[in-house]
Amino acid sequence: MTRHVVIDVETAQSYDHIVEIAAVEVLGNTISPRSLVRRIKPRSDMSRFCYAVHRISLEDLQDEPYFDDVIPELVEFVGDATIVAHNYVYEYNTLKREFERAAHPVYPRERFSCTMALAKRSGLPGKLRHACSQAGISVGHLRDEHDALNDALLAAHLFLKLNRT
């Protein structure tokens, strides 16, 4: 059975310093109940823009681990699966910087698949929530602010829907 892991991150700075990561397992054509969700204490300030997107403050993260401490659990969860992300360039570059800072081998770009590219090829908009809405995936229950788990789940649903067509 084919295994994919859909990843989403929220950051303190654009393309850098993860504050929340979610990974959702997809087995075959089903989203499995297995997921990994961690909040992470960044080694940077929080940009106003990023805070406005996710509303996670540095105070919320004071007791959380640094990314270095989360890497073993993330690597074990991902295993040898293909990594899926919406706008994968964002997740790839952000993970790359975090792995490099921790002196850990980086996932190769070839392991990633992009739901934004799939959406655009299907005539859907690039924004995740807009693409999901137009593809018939419910987004009405979500709060305005982003969180890694809900975005990873949306991307997983979009991935499954677009891979069936």
Image (cartoon, helix red, strand yellow):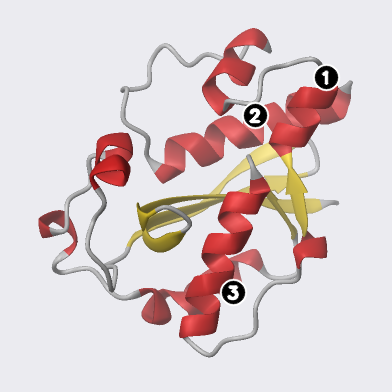
Say left or right for 11 vs 86: left
> What x and y, as percent, mark residue 67?
39, 74
Q: Amino acid at mark 1?
A: Ser
| Residue count near mark 2 (Cα–Cα under 10 Å), binned few <14, some 14–19, many ≥20 | many
Kindly identify the residue that appears in the image at 54 percent across and 36 percent down. 153
Q: Is residue 132 above or below residue 108?
A: above
Q: Identify residue for label 3.
A: 76
Of the numbered discs 2 and 1, the one sitting upstream in the chain is: 1
Which residue is outermost to the left?
59
Q: Dot 2 corresponds to which residue?
A: 157
Q: Alpha carbon of mark 1 to alpha carbon of mark 3: how far? A: 33 Å
Q: Callout 3 environment at 10 Å: few (<14), some (14 to 19), or many (20+)?
A: few
Q: Are marks 1 and 3 in contact (CB under 8 Å)?
A: no
Q: Residue at x 52, y 72 (%)?
A: 97
Q: Residue furthest bottom?
A: 103
> On the image, which quarter does residue 147 sit in?
top left
Q: Give the distance between the C-alpha atoms of the residues marked 2 and 1, in whole angstroms.
A: 15 Å
Q: Which quadrant does the C terminus fall into?
A: top right
Q: Left of 95 or right of it: where is 108?
A: right
